[in-house]
Image (cartoon, grey):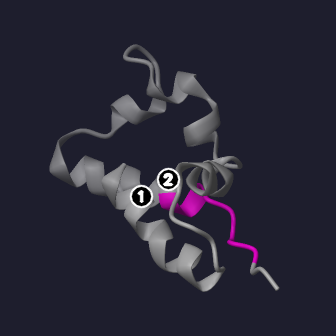
Amino acid sequence: MHTVLGSLLGDMYKAHRKWIADEFVEMTSESEWFTDASQWEKNGGEATTYSGYGGMDKLAAVIIESLAPVPMED
């Protein structure tokens, strides 16, 4: 999650969003990785198919890809 949330910081800065919990929730609200707890279940969740350090990097990439583009504020 540190990798995923860290990847949002630049986009949030460009979109003039504050680095507060509510803004991170807004940024991640469209991703099933943040809205569907079954993704993380020990038995049968997709996250369990990624193991080891390489798996963590791949999972982070999949989650980052699932995040919606950041809308720019006026």
Within the image, what quadrant is residue 13 found in? bottom right
Give the left or right position of residue 4, taking residue 22 as reference: left
- Main SS of the magenta part reads loop
Q: Are marks 1 and 2 in contact (CB under 8 Å)?
A: yes
What's the amino acid at mark 1? Val
Q: 4 above or below 33?
A: below
Q: Residues within 10 Å of mark 2 (few under 14, many from 20)?
A: many
Q: Residues within 10 Å of mark 1 (few under 14, many from 20)?
A: some
Give the camera-side residue of 60 and 72. Answer: 72
Residue where numbered disc 1 is placed: 4
What's the amino acid at mark 2? Ile
Secondary structure of residue under mark 2: helix
- Quadrant that contains the C terminus: bottom right
Dot label at residue 63: 2
Q: Residue at x 41, y 34 (%)?
A: 47
Give the camera-side residue of 29 and 52. Answer: 29
Label 1 and label 2: CA atoms lie apart by 7 Å
